[in-house]
Image (cartoon, rainbow, N blue to C red):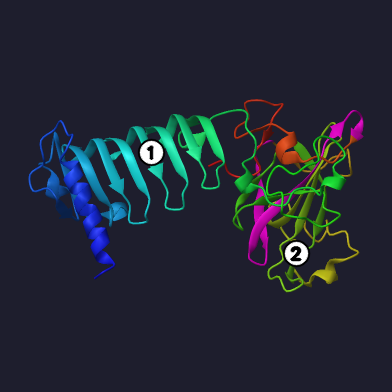
Amino acid sequence: MKRLLPVLTGFALLLLSSTEGWSLPPCPGSPHTISDYKEVTSWSNCHGAITFGSGAGKRAGNKYVGEWKDGKLHGQGTETFASGSKYVGEYKDGIFHGQGTYTWADGDKYEGQWKDDNFHGHGTFTWADGDKYVGQWKNGKKHTSEYPIPCRRVGTSVTPANVTYGKKERTCKRDWKGYAEKESVTFEVVSGSPVYAITNMRLYRVKGLSSKERRGESPYDDIHLYFETDNGSTYEYYHMKSSYLTPTCPVWDKFEDSYGWDHTEECGANPGTPYGKGEKVTKGQLIGYSGATGNHGHFDIAFKPMINGRRHIVQGDRYFEWECGNEDPSKFHMPFECK
C-alpha cells in the first residue's frame, strides 16, 4: 500500500491542478475510469480527467487530463502512459496533432509539431545521452538531407592509427578501444535490424564467417559483403546475420572452420570481380539484417573511398554527409533505419 500512495497522491494533485486555468467547463462525472469511449460520448467542449481501463485498447492503463470534443481527446491535454512515458500538447479527434512534447520513460524526448500521431513539421529530438537533432520531420521521419550519424548509434570506430585520410580522433565513445587492425566503424543496433546500402554499388566478394560459437560468444554472426562503386571506392559490411545477396551462407560449428576459404560460392552470391559485373544495389536499398556477437547486437562498415586517385581508410560516420532519403546524390544514405 505504501508504494501505491505516492502514485495516487500524484494523480490526485494532477487532477486538482487540472481544474485551474481551463477556459472550458468541467466534463460531467470527471474524473472517471472508462473501458470504452461510448461512456463519455456526452463529453464535448469541456475538460475532464480519465483513467483508461483494461478494455480501452492501446490506451489501457493510461491517464489523460485535458480537453474533449464529441467524446474524443481534442484540444490541449496531458497523457501519462502506463509505460512511464508522457505527452503534453495538442490533440485532434483523439490523436496527437499540433504542438506537443513526448517524453519516453528512458529519457528520450521529442518536442515540436505533430500530425496524425506522427512527428511532422519542425521539431527537436533529444536522446537520453545528449545527442540532438533539430529540423524538419515528415510522417514520423527526419526530413532533411544533411546531418551526422548520432553517437548513440556509433560504437568502436576505426583504430586511429589506421585512418589514412581525414581526422583520426574518435568523435564518439572515445574510451571504447578496438583491436589494433580495426578499419571499420561499429554501428550499435538491435540484432536483426534492417541494414541499407549507403550508395549505389555492386557486390564483388562474400565471406561467410558466421559460427555457432567463437571464444565463448554465441551466436557469432559474421557474413561479410564487399561492395565497390564505379569510381573504385570499396565498402565492406560485416557482422551481418543474413542477406538476400547470400541466401545459402553456412553457419560453421567453429569460427576456425571457416578459415582459408572463399565462401562466395557456398553463400549462393552473384558477385563480379573488382571493377567487373556483380549484383548491383542502389542507394537506400535493403541489403540484409544486422547480427550479434554474443549479446552484443551490431554490424560494421569499413569505409575505403577513392580520394585523389588512392583508396583511403576514413572514419566514415563523420567523414561523410548523410541523409535518410535520396534527395542529394553527393550524400550517403543512413545504413540503418532513421528514427
Q: Residue 279: where, in percent of width, then height?
A: 77, 43
For mark 1, give the secondary structure: strand
Q: Is residue 271 magenta?
A: no
Answer above or below: position of 188 versus 284: below
Could you say which quadrant of the image residue 314 lies in? top right
Q: Residue 159: where, in percent of width, then height?
A: 81, 49
Answer above or below: position of 50 versus 101: below
Q: Is residue 185 visible?
A: yes
The residue that label 2 is drawn on is: 210
The residue that label 1 is drawn on is: 101
Answer above or below: position of 210 versus 72: below
For mark 2, give the secondary structure: loop
The mark closer to the camera, 2 or 1, is 1
Q: Residue at x 49, y 38 (%)?
A: 125
Q: Main secondary structure of the magenta part?
A: strand
Residue in the foreground of this view, choosing between 272 and 70: 70
Q: In the image, which residues are magenta?
A: 283-310
Q: Residue 40: where, in percent of width, then height?
A: 13, 46
Residue in the foreground of this view, choosing between 232 and 11: 11
Q: Amino acid at mark 1?
A: Thr
